Image (tube, helix red, strand yellow):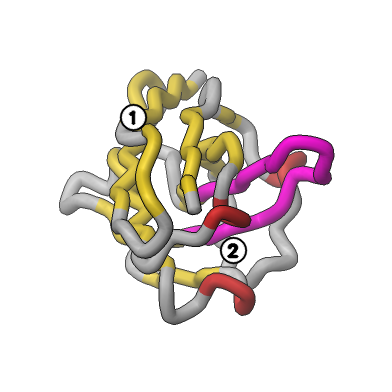
């Protein structure tokens, strides 16, 4: 099994930048994809970004502000968030899976490991 631990969340002001990290441990040799979802209060969980091997994909609504990257070992994934807006306030969850995904069609259930989430709060 894989274990995922997120870090980097916090309280920032609108326009600020933040980088979230997610480190995988355990059965990491079969980790093909790592990504992020988020869930804002009262809203459904939504896809944010995924990286499969060295192929990143960011949801259209966040392109230009968010980017995703992985370290050389492919066991840590980062979500780089710029020009943050109050509507980006959410709990951000890291996910990992054994299959590649190259679009936002990946659903929460497509992955087989999920982090506990890290809170990002953007004040206006």
Total numbered labels placed on residues in the image: 2
Q: Residues within 10 Å of mark 2 (few under 14, many from 20)?
A: many
Left or right: 25, with 104 as reference point: left
Q: Is residue 5 above or below residue 16?
A: above
Does the magenta segment cover residue 26?
no
Camera-side residue of 20 and 3: 20
Q: Is residue 86 above or below residue 92?
A: below
**Residue 42 visible in this rendered orientation of the protein:** yes
Residue drawn at 20 percent across, 45 percent down: 73
Mark 1–mark 2 Cα distance, whole angstroms, equals 23 Å
Residue 120's spot in the image, x, y percent? 47, 38
Residue 107's spot in the image, x, y percent? 75, 51
| Residue receiving disc 2 | 101
| Residue receiving disc 1 | 7
Residue 10's spot in the image, x, y percent? 37, 33
Which span is picked out in magenta?
A: 36-50
Left or right: 30, with 43 as reference point: left
Kindly indicate the quadrant of the structure image that contains residue 44: top right
Helix, strand or loop under label 2: loop
Residue drawn at 59 percent across, 63 percent down: 101
């Amino acid at each position: 099994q894989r274990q995922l631990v997120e870090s980097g969340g916090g309280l920032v002001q609108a326009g600020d930048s933040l980088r979230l990290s997610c480190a995988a441990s355990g059965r990491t040799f079969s980790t093909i994809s790592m990504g992020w979802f988020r869930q804002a209060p009262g809203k459904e969980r939504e896809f944010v970004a995924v990286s499969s091997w060295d192929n990143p994909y960011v949801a259209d609504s966040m392109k230009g502000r968010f980017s995703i990257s992985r370290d050389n070992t492919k066991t840590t994934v980062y979500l780089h968030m710029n020009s943050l807006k109050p509507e980006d306030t959410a709990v951000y969850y890291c996910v990992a899976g054994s299959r590649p995904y190259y679009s936002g069609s990946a659903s929460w259930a497509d992955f087989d490991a999920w982090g506990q989430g890290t809170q990002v709060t953007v004040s206006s």
